[in-house]
Image (cartoon, rainbow, N blue to C red):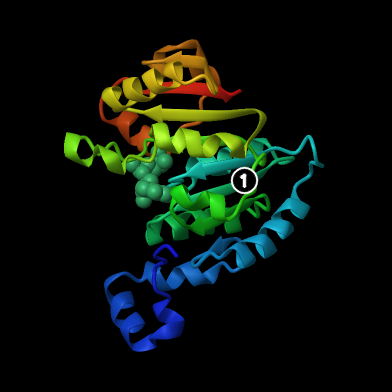
Amino acid sequence: MRYRPRNYRDENPEVFSQLVKNNPYMARVYDFPELLIPHPTPENFQQLWTNIIKETSGAAPSRKIHLEIGCGSGRYLIEWAQENQQDAFIGLELRFKRLVLAAKKIERQNIRNILLMREHGEFIDEYLPHNSIDCLHINFPDPWSKKTRRKHRILSTDFLAKMHPFFRPKGELRFKTDHLEYFETITDILKEIDTYKIAEHTADLHRSNYNENNILTEFEMLFKSKGNPPIAFLRAEAL
Ligand SMILES: C[S@@+](CC[C@H](N)C(=O)[O-])C[C@H]1O[C@@H](n2cnc3c(N)ncnc32)[C@H](O)[C@@H]1O
């Protein structure tokens, strides 16, 4: 069994009240039971996900399933979901405050096709079956720049191999980063393995033709306001 974060609220309320003093968002993640799962299990995921699927305007098999790993405060996820109301979206994030900010926006705008979970992207296989994801979005993942720390990167040869069976036919990975070395490493891996094909690729998204349809993330907006360094983007198809 893998480690799951403790549920102090239910298991040890005294410790929980101390933790909440330092980070009030630890309590606020419980305020959105219809759309945010603070302690996901395959069972509570399935319950909520079934509701979300019902709320989409699309029908299988044309309804697409999107997964964003590290969705932050949800800017990108929300805009994608609003533009594609026939599709269903899962956002995974670890930080309490970012989850609460995303959930507040989703609730305020009455968006019904997004489910948020406090979960590591690496464990999505516990929730979704093979052949279920149409689009995997990973934007500005932590680059773990130091060589000795690179094993912590979410995108890697192993992760791409693990995720491959979860894609539906024509499933795609969309990846943006400001970290050129990370981008080149993933580009090289994708070129090497024969299970993915790079369909779109640019080391300078904002000055490329792909920019027209680009949806900005919070981090991307921040970069734009701080001198607009080149942002790299690729879209790869799972074969
Ligand atoms: C640099 S931020 C980018 C946030 C957002 N994608 C954006 O572009 O504005 C990376 C985010 O990924 C989250 N994160 C890091 N590792 C993760 C993991 N293994 N699974 C899910 N989220 C993760 C972090 O908490 C953080 O909010």
Q: Residue 15: where, in percent of width, then height?
A: 31, 83
Left or right relative to 14: residue 112: right
Report helix, strand or loop for mark 1.
strand
What residue is drawn where x is 47% and y is 67%? Answer: 29
Q: Residue 66: where, in percent of width, then height?
A: 61, 40
Q: Quadrant of the N terminus?
A: bottom left
| 200 to 75, vertically: above or below | above
Q: Is residue 73 visible?
A: no
Q: Quadrant of the C terminus?
A: top right
Within-10-Å neighbours for mark 1: few <14, some 14–19, many 20+ = many
Left or right relative to 140: residue 173: right
Q: Residue 131: where, in percent of width, then height?
A: 67, 39
Q: Residue 218: where, in percent of width, then height?
A: 40, 40
Q: Which residue is mark 1?
A: 89
What residue is drawn where x is 30% and y is 43%? Answer: 152
Location of residue 224 by image quarter: top left
The amino acid marked with disc number 1 is Phe
Q: Is residue 71 visible?
A: yes
| 184 to 165, vertically: above or below | above
187 or 22, nearer to the observer: 187
Residue that sits furthest to the bottom in the current view: 14
Location of residue 222 by image quarter: top left
What residue is drawn where x is 49% and y is 51%? Answer: 92
- Report whether the residue tagged 1 is closer than 8 Å to ligand 1: no
